[in-house]
Amino acid sequence: MAQPPEPTTTHVPALNKPYTSDMLPAGFVFKPKARCLLDHYLVPKALHGRVPDDVIQDAIADGIDVYAVRPEALPFPPRNCGTYDGHFEAWGYFFGTRPAAAAAGGGDGDVRDVSAGGCWCRYGREKEYADDDGEVYGFQTRHAFYEARDGGERTPWRVKEFRLNEGAACFRGVTFHPSAKDLVVWKVYNVVELPEEEPAEDYYSSDEDDEENEAKMNRFKVGDLCIAGPAANTA
């Protein structure tokens, strides 16, 4: 019976200055699992107003309004942009504030207009993330970008929105940072449509992500974070 190949793990040496994306080895990219985003970025940011010193400081952009511009106009890191079998691929992570209508609940937040035209429409079921005690402490919802609200064409652009369940037991008695109201992490990316073929077994891809073109990857560690690499066919 065939066995999966042994993973390759490289430990980055301790640094005397904050670790940033431009210090990643050539060909490696920031493409973590959902729990990494929740545990190492969203939770510390919500509690302390900043990310910890031992994670990649600029991996998630701050101060960018994803509802102000169309997705292709967002400032994606250059190493996260490239071509795959002739198709352009890009992705990026952004801290932001959940729209008031979505935070209030109900269906009003399922369609979110973009100032520059088009809208994000929610699809699929909400995904829950539980802690070791089985208590749900985080959620993920998915959204697709349409050219218009009514009858607009669906584009290849997608968003995964991660937010915390502030009412979870693990947050009882915790004071959240003043800037953390309705704080979320957005993963914005485009879906690359590839010719249908028999998929190869992928031992290293994230089981949290469901993009159609997840590539085989090795991993190395920065603190407790898994970083994917090398990036395939990047420009």
Image: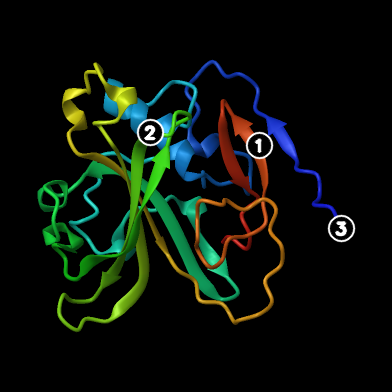
Q: Are marks 1 and 2 in contact (CB under 8 Å)?
A: no
Crowd around label 2: few <14 · some 14–19 · many ≥20 (10 Å): some
Going 43% across and 34% down the picture, which residue do you hit?
134
For marks 1 and 2 on the same chain, the one whose residue lies earlier in the sequence? 2
Q: Amino acid at mark 3?
A: Ala
Q: How crowded is the residue under tag 3: few (<14 C-alpha within 10 Å), some, or many (20+)?
A: few
Mark 1 or mark 2, whichever is nearer to me: 2
Q: Is residue 211 above or below residue 44?
A: below
Q: Which residue is mark 2?
A: 135
Residue visible at 24% across and 66% down in the picture? 121
Q: Nearer the viewer, residue 179 or 74?
A: 179
Q: Residues within 10 Å of mark 1 (few under 14, many from 20)?
A: some
Residue holding disc 3: 2
Residue 49 image point, x, y percent: 27, 24
Which amino acid lies under the numbered mark 1 shown in the image of this protein? Phe
Let me know if residue 193 appears in the view: yes
Disc 1 designates what residue? 220
In the image, residue 33 above or below residue 131: below
